[in-house]
Image: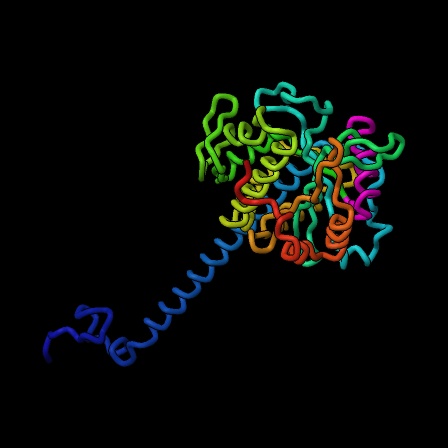
């Protein structure tokens, strides 16, 4: 008998004479294959378990961070118990304002209320959470403020804080406001840093707090984003446009790079946002997290930024009543995008002065 190795014998020449092995070489590869699958299955299960533990842990951290956001009591908000099932078809609207502090932590360089900047806007999320819009209301527009009379809208915050501001905006727009949020502009700088910077466009070269912004595209970091939003030489309306532009740039960066698609990324973004926010006391932690994720899903195609149209009459800024009425109705009907198509000149441009 030849000593030549049997190439089909996985045990090699040393065991080739064993009839028990040479008779059926298939069982051992089969057992190895089954063992291989079991090892792979156990490994995959272990990895999935680890991912689940990390996800649950990070989710708990996200909720802990969101729960630390300062709360204030705000009246005149549309309660969920009153809206009931109808709220699902109407979507959700949040009144957002800004703090009046500049990049150095000192008061803004123009007269303003102690707690609010001129930023007054309605953030509306459609019922499907896949589209929405932001409607900015000029802060110096003359409106009726309960208990005060006809005055500039932003004075409602000075006279009565968020309670009166919410009441005045609801009376003006007839839009049910579910929640209130105040953004710290310094905190927005931290958000910009967390998302890795944002891009804005300017029509001409300008300087703010010693920093030069070039005409065209500018990459903003945490500090320069605040210089951009609070440029002293701009009018209050101009600064509001800058702040709205900055918020839009942040939302687009979050959406474009899917920064809220994993628990870990969500934690970092929510942590930064939490340091910039003060919200009403009825705004639950889960609602904040849900709203943040909804904002992360809005793309430039699914979100619309518009400014309520106004004009100057006798030295006063007055809202264009007829067109604004259609805008308020569009918010309630989840059709801000349709309004923007009909009145494209109300859309806040990507390039603001």
Q: Is residue 167 magenta?
A: yes
Residue ID at (56%, 35%) = 191
**At which x and y percent is residue 87?**
79, 55
Figure quadrant of residue 65: top right
In the rendered image, the quadrant that contains the N terminus is: bottom left
Left or right of residue 151: residue 55: left
Looking at this rendering, what residue extends furthest in the front direction?
314
Q: Which residues are magenta?
A: 157-178
Left or right of residue 164: residue 129: left
Is 249 located above or below residue 233 in the figure?
Answer: below
Front-most of 143 and 251?
143
Residue ID at (15%, 73%) = 5
Residue ID at (22%, 76%) = 8
**At which x and y percent is residue 148?**
87, 30
Front-most of 74 and 311?
311
Is 109 located above or below residue 132 in the figure?
Answer: above
Left or right of residue 8: residue 65: right
In the rendered image, the quadrant that contains the C terminus is: top right
Front-most of 309 and 51?
309
The way the protein has been coloured in the rendering is: rainbow
Residue 77 visible: yes
Residue 54 visible: no
Residue ID at (61%, 20%) = 105
């Amino acid at each position: 008998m030849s000593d030549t190795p049997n190439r089909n014998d996985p045990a090699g020449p040393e065991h080739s004479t064993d009839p028990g092995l040479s008779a059926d070489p298939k069982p051992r590869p089969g057992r190895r294959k089954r063992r291989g699958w079991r090892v792979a299955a156990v490994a995959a299960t272990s990895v999935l378990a680890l991912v689940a533990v990390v996800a649950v842990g990070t989710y708990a951290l996200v909720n802990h961070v969101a729960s630390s956001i300062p709360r204030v009591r705000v009246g005149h908000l549309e309660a969920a118990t009153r809206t009931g099932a109808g709220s699902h078809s109407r979507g959700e609207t949040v009144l957002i304002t800004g703090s009046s502090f500049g990049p150095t932590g000192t008061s803004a360089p123009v007269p303003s209320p102690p707690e609010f900047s001129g930023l007054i806007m309605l953030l509306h999320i459609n019922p499907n959470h896949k589209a929405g819009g932001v409607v900015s209301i000029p802060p110096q527009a003359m409106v009726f403020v309960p208990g005060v009379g006809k005055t500039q809208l932003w004075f409602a915050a000075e006279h009565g804080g968020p309670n009166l501001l919410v009441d005045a905006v609801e009376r003006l727009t007839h839009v049910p406001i579910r929640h209130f949020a105040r953004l710290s502009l310094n905190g927005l700088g931290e958000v910009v840093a967390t998302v890795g910077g944002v891009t804005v466009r300017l029509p001409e070269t300008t300087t703010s707090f010693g920093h030069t912004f070039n005409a065209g595209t500018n990459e903003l970091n945490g500090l320069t984003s605040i210089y951009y939003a609070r440029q002293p030489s701009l009018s209050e309306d101009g600064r509001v446009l800058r702040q709205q532009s900055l918020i839009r740039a942040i939302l687009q960066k979050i959406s474009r790079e899917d920064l809220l698609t994993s628990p870990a990324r969500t934690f970092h973004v929510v942590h930064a946002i939490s340091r910039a926010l003060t919200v009403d006391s009825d705004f639950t932690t889960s609602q904040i997290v849900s709203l943040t994720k909804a904002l992360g899903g809005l793309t430039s195609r699914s979100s619309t930024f518009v400014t309520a149209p106004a004009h100057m009459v006798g030295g006063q800024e007055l809202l264009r009543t007829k067109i604004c009425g259609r805008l308020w109705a569009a918010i309630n009907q989840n059709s801000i995008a349709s309004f923007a198509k009909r009145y494209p000149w109300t859309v806040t441009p990507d390039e603001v002065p």
